Amino acid sequence: MEFKKEFEEKYSKLTNWGEYKEAISKFPRKSIRVNTLKISVKELKEALEKKSYELEQIPWCNEGFWVKERRDLATSEEHKKGYFFIQGSVSMIPSIVLDLNEEDLVLDMCASPGGKTTHMASIMNNKGLILANEAISSRLTALIFNLQRCGVMNTIVTYEDALKLKGKFDKILLDAPCSASGTIIGDSKHTERTLLEWNQNTILRLAKLQKKLILKAYELLKENGVMVYSTCSLEPEEDEEVVQYLLDKTDAKLERVNLDIKADWNNGIKIWPQYYGTEGFFVSKIIKE
Ligand SMILES: C[S@@+](CC[C@H](N)C(=O)[O-])C[C@H]1O[C@@H](n2cnc3c(N)ncnc32)[C@H](O)[C@@H]1O
């Protein structure tokens, strides 16, 4: 892996560079989330273990498992039937943190390919209502396909710039478009491209959009509502600073993310790749009183 000088300088100030570099030299652990709309955790575990898949419980998600596996999980019969979703273990955190219930009206502002929408639908037992929005038309197919594969029935898909949405919601997930620097892990074409494209100007351009999106999310939130802001970026400009912008501009209240998880805390939790051998991720929980 080749790192730009600016990247190494910045990350050396943000974290332990040696530990980070060592962690991202390996591929992240594969993980799956059981789709409880179609099968119970016990049943799927038994079915996969019968086929000699080795599963290890993800501590923060009852339905989540790390899978020691060389075979392609996506082509398995169980995946095609929608019994599980291949999802990064840290990407399971936002839907858990939203405190969803079966009566909620939920907005998923930036939804494709639907990893978190399908998770929310299963937590809600296909009850309540989720509005899953996506602004890029070419990304709608994957979202709709995943909702259908997973048997999601409580979700309406909209195709709109999230900044133009209207209405009031009990819970809002803003899983924002970002530089994806947390996905720099494992020696792959994706890592190579993300490292090559990494630059401060892009990060600042994205931060501008994220600040608009977070203000919009807060505007769409009902009183006593909960929202979660998350990114797969490790850049403070796209994470902690976006949340700080919302706190400065509005009466939004920051909530602790109550999960037993090793993470840095500053306006939310930041999980570095070296903590669990996962992608890097940021999650912040906000309430409107
Ligand atoms: C991080 S991805 C979402 C991943 C998704 N939440 C999941 O868990 O599967 C961000 C998404 O936001 C979409 N997006 C970008 N700008 C947007 C906008 N202005 N309004 C709505 N969606 C947008 C992107 O096309 C992308 O699909």
Image (spheres, rainbow, N blue to C red):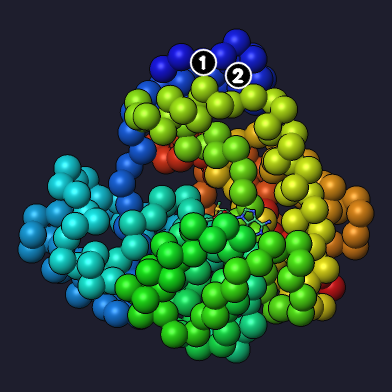
Q: Say whether residue 280 is left or right of residue 77.
A: right
Say which element carries label 1.
Answer: loop
Q: Check disc 2 and report its element: helix, strand or loop.
A: helix
Percent coordinates x, y for residue 65 in the rendering? 31, 57
Is the residue marked 1 within 8 Å of ligand 1, measured from its CB? Answer: no
Q: Residue 115, position in %: x, y?
A: 45, 62
- Asked if the residue at label 2 sits under 8 Å from ligand 1, the reply is no
Circle 1 Cα neighbour tier, 10 Å, few/some/many (<14 / 14–19 / ≥20): few
**Percent position (x, y) of residue 152?**
41, 80
User: Looking at the figure, which quarter contains the C terminus?
Assistant: bottom right
What residue is shown with label 2? 7
Figure quadrant, ligand 1: bottom right
Q: In the picture shown, does residue 50 fall above or below 68?
A: below
In this orientation, does residue 5 appear? yes
Quarter holding the N terminus?
A: top left
Task: Let me know if residue 258 appears in the view.
Answer: no
Residue type pointed to by label 1: Phe
Nearest the viewer among 20 and 85 is: 85
Position of 280 with respect to 175 (left or right) is left
Nearest the eye: 237 or 145: 145
Q: Residue at x 67, y 56 (%)?
A: 229
Residue identified by numbered label 1: 3
User: Which is nearer the eye, 31 or 145?
Assistant: 145
> Is there CB contact under 8 Å for labels 1 and 2?
yes
Q: At 85% across and 53% down in the image, what residue appears?
A: 247
The image position of residue 80, as x and y in percent, is 23, 67
Identified by mark 2, the residue type is Phe
